[in-house]
Image: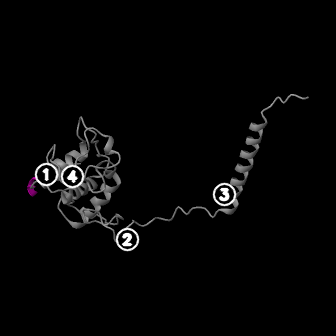
Amino acid sequence: MQNDTYNRGGYIAFLFSMAFSLCFFVYVTLIHPGVSLREVPEPAGGPEQKLAGGGATNGDVDISKNDKPWEESADVVAHGAHIFANNCAVCHGPKGLGDGPAGLSLNPRPRNFVEGKWKVGGDSVNLYKTVSGGIPGSSMASFAHIPSKDRWSLVQFVRSITQNKIKDDPAKVEAFAKTAK
């Protein structure tokens, strides 16, 4: 009687995995039509879906010609909603309630913009400073890498969704905005 010096079960599993891999490779390269990377899915509510601030989700608002993004306007708020969805919603949640997926593990939890109280001040100047510099000792990072007009758009969006709106002094905001970078 001959002694088997190899693992017959392992050898069969190896052959099966190689055959499967080869079949999968043939399917992917020759049969499957592929995935078009040019396809962009529409939002769940269709192209008319709006965010909490009233702006379109597609971010097609051009504020580059707006010389005063610190002044409230529907276009600036819509652009801010797009910037918020791409940069802030992961922590602050899609509606600004402080319930974003990444924010659930942070301590302290992210700010609820809709009904929360402001740590640093809720006027436009303090919101801009917070977006630009973050809040030391918290998880709120600096977003100074975002262009100034986009940061002002974020400020206008946050002010559009909050119930705890602090009154602005337009002259003070404009004076600050002209020196802010």
List the single residue furthest toward the right.
1
Which quadrant of the figure has residue 77? Answer: bottom left
- Secondary structure beneath dot 4 equals loop
Magenta-highlighted residues: 168-172
Residue indicated by mark 4: 113
Q: Three-letter amino acid code at disc 2?
A: Pro
Position of 102 with respect to 133 (left or right) is right
Residue indicated by mark 2: 47
Q: Three-letter amino acid code at disc 4?
A: Phe
Residue drawn at point x = 68 percent, y = 63 percent: 31
For marks 2 and 4, give the CA distance.
26 Å
For marks 4 and 1, give the CA distance.
12 Å
Q: Three-letter amino acid code at disc 3?
A: Val
Residue indicated by mark 3: 28
Position of 1 with respect to 55 (left or right) is right
Position of 31 with respect to 149 (left or right) is right
160 is within the stretch colored magenta: no
For marks 2 and 3, give the CA distance.
33 Å
Q: Three-letter amino acid code at disc 1?
A: Asp
Q: Give whichever of discs 2 and 3 has the lower sequence position.
A: 3
Which quadrant of the figure has residue 85? Answer: bottom left
- Secondary structure beneath dot 1 equals loop
Residue indicated by mark 1: 123
Q: Give whichever of discs 2 and 1 has the lower sequence position.
A: 2
